[in-house]
Image (cartoon, grey):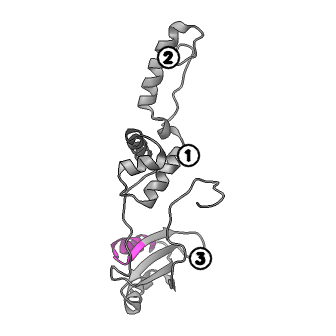
């Protein structure tokens, strides 16, 4: 959404007389109602209040508005409006839960790299989208075409899955022993460290 352009006859043009003051305020409020401020701010320019809200959401996406308001120092209504704007600008894409794979019956996790060439990439992606073992797939630069995070019920199950995709290209598999740093939330760009 672009910024509003003004010309010499536009109501937004700065007026030196006080007669135009109320007209200017009326048009300002109309413009900011139609073009929410946060919707025009790139994500790397989010203010501290927005990042406080994002930190709280990343810690607990089920947190009630009252708890989010306490975390940001805003009223419940202002917090709800900010959250809606963050969703409207596409920054908050969804609210989800994170499962413990081993407790869900998948004690084995692996990172699989696969090198695929055209025209095999499209059918490979179709196969991966249908595979319940695949948690995520990244298209990457380098020796591999894709990097997959997969889960399996055991080593035999992992070997079986790899066999289903070997026909699309050469695979390299790394079995995950442990995860010293779990997937975590984002912090403002340029942060010296995580708090």
- Quarter of the picture holding the C terminus: bottom right
Q: Which mark is residue 24?
A: 2
Nearer the viewer's eye, disc 1 or disc 3?
1
Nearer the viewer's eye, disc 1 or disc 2?
1
Q: Is residue 125 magenta?
A: yes
Q: Residue at x 37, y 89 (%)?
A: 157
Q: Is residue 61 magenta?
A: no
State the residue in front, 166 or 35.
35
What is the count of numbered marks?
Answer: 3
- The percent coordinates of residue 100 (x first, y second) are 38, 76
Q: Which residue is mark 3?
A: 143
Q: Who comes first in sequence, dot 3 or dot 2?
A: 2
Circle 1 residues within 10 Å: few <14, some 14–19, many ≥20? few
Image quadrant assignment for residue 94: bottom left
Dot 1: what SS? helix
Q: Main secondary structure of the magenta part?
A: helix
Q: Which residue is mark 1?
A: 48
State the residue in front, 145 or 58.
58
Q: Residue at x 50, y 65 (%)?
A: 184
Magenta residues, as a range?
121-135
Q: Residue at x 47, y 82 (%)?
A: 110
State the residue in front, 113 or 166.
113
Circle 3 residues within 10 Å: few <14, some 14–19, many ≥20? few
- The percent coordinates of residue 48 (x first, y second) are 55, 46
């Amino acid at each position: 959404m672009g910024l509003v352009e003004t010309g010499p006859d536009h109501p937004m043009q700065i007026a030196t007389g006080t007669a135009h003051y109320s007209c200017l305020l009326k048009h300002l409020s109309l413009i900011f109602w139609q073009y929410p401020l946060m919707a025009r701010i790139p994500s790397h320019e989010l203010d501290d209040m927005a990042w406080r809200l994002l930190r709280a959401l990343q810690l607990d996406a089920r947190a009630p508005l009252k708890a989010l308001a306490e975390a940001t120092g805003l009223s419940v209504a202002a917090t709800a409006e900010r959250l809606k704007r963050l969703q409207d600008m596409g920054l908050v894409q969804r609210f989800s839960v994170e499962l413990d794979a081993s407790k869900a019956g998948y004690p084995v996790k692996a990172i699989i790299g696969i090198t695929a060439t055209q025209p095999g990439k499209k059918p490979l992606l179709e196969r991966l989208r249908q595979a319940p073992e695949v948690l995520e797939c990244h298209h990457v630069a380098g020796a591999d075409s894709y990097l997959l995070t997969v889960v399996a019920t055991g080593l035999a199950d992992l070997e079986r899955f790899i066999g289903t995709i070997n026909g699309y290209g050469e695979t390299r598999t790394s079995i995950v022993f442990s995860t010293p740093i779990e997937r975590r939330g984002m912090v403002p760009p340029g942060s010296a460290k995580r708090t």
